[in-house]
Amino acid sequence: MYIAFLTVTPMDEGPSLSEHVKAAIQVISSSGLKYQVTAMGTIIESPDLPSLFRVVQEAVRAVRAKGSQRISVSLRIDCRYDEDATIDSKMTSVM
C-alpha cells in the first residue's frame, strides 16, 4: 500500500484557489482510491504506483482545465513494505 500527500496548486490564479482545488479533489474522489482532504493537501491511499500517478496526472489536468498556466505539484509518498500500512493505521498509531 502506498500513502501519498498531494498538493496541486495553481500559481497564476490569484488569492482564492478553491475552485481549482475542488476540481482536483473531484478527480481524486472519482478515482475510487481512498483519500482524506486536509487544510493543506490531500492524503491518498493507493495499492500501486501506476494508480497513484494516474490520479496525480488527472488532478493536474483538471487544474489546467480551469485555465492555470503554471501549476506547482508536491507529492510525498510513504512506501512501506514490511507491513500493510493504511491512512487509518497510521492515524491510529499516533493517536
Image: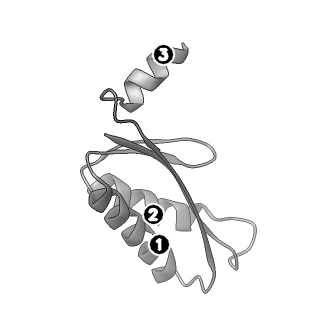
Name the residue beneath numbered marker 3: 93
Residue depicted at x 36% and y 31%: 86
Q: Are marks 3 and 2 in contact (CB under 8 Å)?
A: no
Name the residue beneath numbered marker 1: 60
Task: Return the residue nearer the eye: 16 or 37.
Answer: 37
Figure label count: 3
Query: Residue 82, position in %: x, y?
Result: 34, 28
Coloured how?
A: one colour
Comparing marks 3 and 1, which lies closer to the viewer?
Answer: 3
Q: CA distance from mark 3 to mark 1?
A: 32 Å
Query: What is the number of the mark on residue 24?
Result: 2
Residue depicted at x 27% and y 58%: 51
Q: Secondary structure at mark 3?
A: helix
Q: In which quadrant is the N terminus drawn?
A: top left
The amino acid marked with disc number 2 is Ala
Q: Secondary structure at mark 1?
A: helix
Mark before the other along the chain sequence, 3 or 2: 2
Q: CA distance from mark 3 to mark 2?
A: 29 Å
Residue depicted at x 59% and y 82%: 68
Task: Return the residue nearer the eye: 21 or 48.
Answer: 48
The amino acid marked with disc number 1 is Val
The amino acid marked with disc number 3 is Ser
